[in-house]
């Protein structure tokens, strides 16, 4: 049965944020991506830099389209055309997530965005699912990390692991593996 709604993580699923973050901070090759892979959070990294939050957000929004994974724009257009409801649930704060989504030109595909979702909590995922599919229907969470998989499991929905993202091994709870973004069309 095809998914009636898809909920996406943002970093490592829709866009390759680490190089964008490094460029926005003016720290190319400084290891920001490595710190984030080890569980770091971009907010304190911004705070410890010489770049203001407003400058960082503006730079990320301007660079966002270039960070999209191959096929994202076309795949989302196809999903929208066939009537699949879509949303984003991210641990990024809204002051960063929303400008990135707008800057990449994807806002029309995501009428529901839950930011600062505190994954692995299921709260943001469940709220997005209720908003996207008020009645019954199959909802799948697509993400690249352990916290995404845990949030899907806690919410009682299937998890599709974006293997092209930031986690090298499929997290516990993975029900499908997505090797390229276009494969979400088969969920």
Image: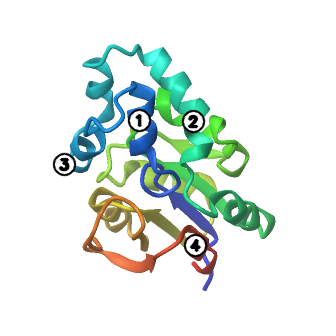
- Closer to the N terminus: mark 1 or mark 3? 1
The mark closer to the camera, 4 or 2, is 2
Residue carrying label 3: 38
**Cβ–Cβ under 8 Å for marks 4 and 2:** no
- Residue 115, can we see it? yes
The quadrant the N terminus occupies is bottom right
Please give the name of the residue rendered at 73% of the width and 46% of the height, measured from the top-left corner.
108
Residue toward you, 66 or 58: 66
Residue carrying label 4: 184
- Closer to the N terminus: mark 1 or mark 2? 1
**Left or right: where 76 falls relative to 56:** right
**Left or right: where 103 falls relative to 91:** right
Which secondary structure, mark 3? loop
Residue 21 numbered tag? 1
- Closer to the N terminus: mark 4 or mark 3? 3
How many tags in the picture? 4
Q: Position of residue 107 (x, y in %)?
A: 68, 43
Q: Position of residue 118 (x, y in %)?
A: 32, 43
Mark 3 burial class by Cα count in 10 Å: few <14, some 14-19, many 20+:
few
Mark 1 burial class by Cα count in 10 Å: few <14, some 14-19, many 20+:
many
Which secondary structure, mark 4? helix
Residue toward you, 165 or 77: 165
The mark closer to the camera, 1 or 4, is 1
- Residue 134, can we see it? no
Marks 4 and 3, how far apart in space? Answer: 27 Å
**Cβ–Cβ under 8 Å for marks 1 and 2:** no
Which secondary structure, mark 2? helix
Which secondary structure, mark 1? helix
- Position of residue 87 relative to residue 45, above or below, is below
Marks 1 and 3, how far apart in space? Answer: 15 Å
Residue carrying label 2: 63
């Amino acid at each position: 049965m095809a998914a009636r709604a898809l909920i996406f993580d943002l970093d490592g699923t829709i866009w390759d944020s680490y190089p964008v973050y490094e460029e926005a901070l003016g720290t190319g090759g400084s290891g920001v991506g490595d710190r984030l892979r080890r569980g770091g959070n971009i907010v304190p990294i911004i705070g410890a830099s010489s770049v203001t939050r407003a400058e960082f957000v503006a730079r990320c929004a301007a660079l966002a389209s270039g960070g999209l994974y191959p096929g994202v724009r076309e795949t989302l257009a196809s999903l929208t055309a066939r009537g699949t409801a879509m949303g984003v649930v991210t641990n990024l704060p809204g002051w960063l997530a929303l400008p990135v989504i707008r800057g990449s030109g994807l806002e029309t595909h995501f009428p529901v965005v839950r930011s600062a979702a505190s994954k692995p909590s299921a709260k943001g995922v469940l709220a997005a699912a209720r908003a996207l599919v008020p009645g019954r229907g199959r909802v799948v969470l697509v993400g690249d990390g352990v916290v995404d998989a845990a949030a899907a499991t806690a919410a009682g929905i299937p998890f599709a692991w974006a293997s092209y993202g930031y986690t090298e091994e499929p997290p516990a709870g993975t029900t499908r593996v997505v090797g390229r973004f276009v494969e979400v069309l088969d969920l």
